[in-house]
């Protein structure tokens, strides 16, 4: 299981202020802490940027490359930001992500095809809705893979994300179980006839509810996902409790 730091995002006040001022120093400091945590990759997510600030994606990617050796994930629903990030990448990143949404299929999918990058597949429909059941998630995986196959992107370059729910959702526990079961099926080769790569964003679970919900939920979910065969775990690299849990899981694997 690969540890991906999800701290470099536009909702992080440190990152947003650094982007606003084009100041690399706060990001350098954050990257140092991320590397010290043992993270193997970093998710670069500038958040929503007005058109006149789209160059901040280039700034983020260049700053990361100048200050650490971790592989990058370019994370944005905006095709233009993905394109700008790719334009300054020194090595192939992972592109995050497409779903059944038309704009992503028409504009982000071709970027992945042309660049040869691995591609995250969000199991969401054309309305950005993540269905709750395993059956619906698998159906989306098959549909999106068909689009990728037409674009000449082979299965081995795809990384499927079943979407962990927010615990604020009424059916969050059912959805969490469905995500874990979906990971297990995909990792076992039960859907495509061969194992495929998977990823989750663990921080989705307690987003906005960190003071109300215990960290034990994240830790338990991480262990179950690892047991199901998860390949990439995106998590908070600055939370020592999660890091300890990740290290124990890797030691026992």
Image (cartoon, grey):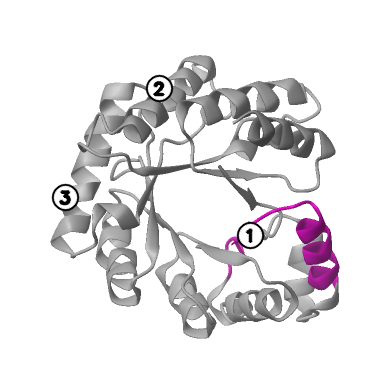
Query: How far separated are the C-alphas under marks 2 and 3?
Result: 22 Å
Please state the horizontal and vertical placement of residue 57, each as a whole percent of the image: 59, 75
Residue on which disc 2 sits? 181
- Who is closer to the viewer here, 167 or 92? 92
**Label number found at residue 42:** 1
**213 lies above or below 84:** above
Instruction: Check the image and name the residue furthest to the front.
Output: 252
Nearer to me, 62 or 104: 62
The kind of secondary structure element at disc 2 is helix
Region of the chain picked out in magenta, as a range? 26-49
Q: Where is residue 158 in the image (x, y as percent from the top left)?
A: 34, 53
In the rendered view, does 10 fall on the left or right side of 239? left
Residues 133 and 66: in front is 66
Q: Residue at x 67, y 58 (%)?
A: 9
Q: Which residue carries the number 3 mark?
A: 146
Counting residues from the start of the chain, the first of labels 2 and 3 encountered is 3
Q: Can residue 138 be seen in this view?
A: yes
Other residues around mark 3 within 10 Å, as few (<14) / some (14–19) / many (≥20): some
């Amino acid at each position: 299981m690969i540890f991906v730091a999800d701290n470099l995002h536009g909702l992080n006040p440190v990152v947003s202020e650094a982007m606003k001022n084009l100041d690399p120093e706060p990001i350098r400091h954050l990257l140092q802490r991320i590397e010290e945590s043992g993270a193997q990759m970093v998710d670069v997510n500038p958040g929503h940027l007005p058109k006149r600030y789209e160059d901040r994606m280039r700034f983020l990617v260049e700053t990361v490359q100048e200050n650490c050796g971790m592989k990058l994930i370019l994370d944005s629903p905006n095709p233009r930001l993905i394109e700008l990030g790719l334009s300054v990448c020194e090595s192939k990143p992972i592109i995050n992500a497409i779903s059944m949404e038309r704009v992503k299929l028409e504009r982000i999918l071709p970027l992945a095809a042309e660049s040869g990058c691995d591609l995250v597949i969000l199991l969401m429909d054309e309305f950005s809705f993540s269905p709750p059941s395993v059956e619906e998630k698998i159906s989306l995986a098959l549909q999106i893979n068909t689009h990728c196959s037409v674009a000449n992107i082979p299965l081995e370059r795809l990384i499927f994300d079943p979407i962990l729910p927010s615990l604020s959702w009424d059916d969050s526990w059912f959805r969490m179980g469905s995500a874990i079961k979906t990971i297990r099926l995909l990792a076992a080769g039960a859907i495509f006839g061969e194992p495929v790569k998977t990823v989750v964003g663990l921080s989705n679970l307690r987003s906005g509810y960190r003071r109300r919900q215990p960290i034990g939920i994240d830790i338990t979910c991480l262990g179950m996902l690892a047991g199901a065969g998860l390949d990439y775990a995106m998590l908070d690299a600055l939370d020592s409790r999660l890091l300890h849990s990740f290290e124990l899981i890797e030691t026992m694997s």
